[in-house]
Image (cartoon, rainbow, N blue to C red):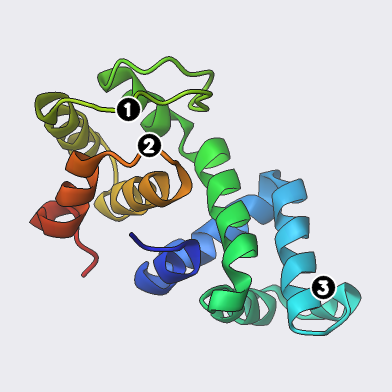
């Protein structure tokens, strides 16, 4: 099981920049919280970080978020981006597993999911969405939720389609 800071280390630079840029554009609360968290943990003032040109600021933020000390901030960023920008994928996955949700957000997860349902849900995501984002989402879903589905964990560990390159 990968932590959020590890996930940010595995994804491409393009995707990590996209996550920050998308959040800066239309999920300001998450972006500002991420910026403030990075600034605090790096012992700098948020205003200093905000004054940096966006490419330099995002590079510093991404490099910071790949470190264990930034796990909570990285998790908050990933969760916020997935819910805001990948809602269709989230709802597709949950619908395929017949899990009740509200716009991709779940209150109670079932204790088990059948292997057939899991395979169908994963295959459906891979057929309709960017592979790297699907991999990121499934790893994040597994690590951020307490369902502990052994078949999802096994797929993340051994299914070639779900491996970061």
> In the picture, residue 38 is in which quadrant?
bottom right
Residue at which label 2 appears:
147
- Residue depicted at 19% across the width and 61% down the height: 163
- Residue depicted at 20% across the width and 36% down the height: 122
- Residue depicted at 54% across the width and 79% down the height: 67
Q: In the rendered view, tell whether residue 141 sits above or below residue 45.
A: above
> Is residue 52 toward the left or the right of residue 150 in the image?
right
Locate residue 129, reporting x and y percent. Answer: 28, 40
Q: Residue furthest front?
A: 111
Residue at which label 1 appears:
111
Q: In the rendered view, tell whether residue 2 sits above or below residue 98.
A: below
> In the picture, residue 59 is in which quadrant?
bottom right
Residue at which label 3 appears:
50
Relative depth, front residue between 52 and 139: 139
Discs 2, 1 touching: Cβ within 8 Å? yes
> In the picture, residue 99 is in which quadrant?
top left
Q: For marks 2 and 1, give the CA distance.
A: 6 Å
> Is residue 136 toward the left or the right of residue 53 in the image?
left
- The mark nearer the N terminus, 3 or 2, is 3
Relative depth, front residue between 152 and 150: 150
Disc number lying in front (1 or 3): 1
Relative depth, front residue between 125 and 99: 99
């Amino acid at each position: 099981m990968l932590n959020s800071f590890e996930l940010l280390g595995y994804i491409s630079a393009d995707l990590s920049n996209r996550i920050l840029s998308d959040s800066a554009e239309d999920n300001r609360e998450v972006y500002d919280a991420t910026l403030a968290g990075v600034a605090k943990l790096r012992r700098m003032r948020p205003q200093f970080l905000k004054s940096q040109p966006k490419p330099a600021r995002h590079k510093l933020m991404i490099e910071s978020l790949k470190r264990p000390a930034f796990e909570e901030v990285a998790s908050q960023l990933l969760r916020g981006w997935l819910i805001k920008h990948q809602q269709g994928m989230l709802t597709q996955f949950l619908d395929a597993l017949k899990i009740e949700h509200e716009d991709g957000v779940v209150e109670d997860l079932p204790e088990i999911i059948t292997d057939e349902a899991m395979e169908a849900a994963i295959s459906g995501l891979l057929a309709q969405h960017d592979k790297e984002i699907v991999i990121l989402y499934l790893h994040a879903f597994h690590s951020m939720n307490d369902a502990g589905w052994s078949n999802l964990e096994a797929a993340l560990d051994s299914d070639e389609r779900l491996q970061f390159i």
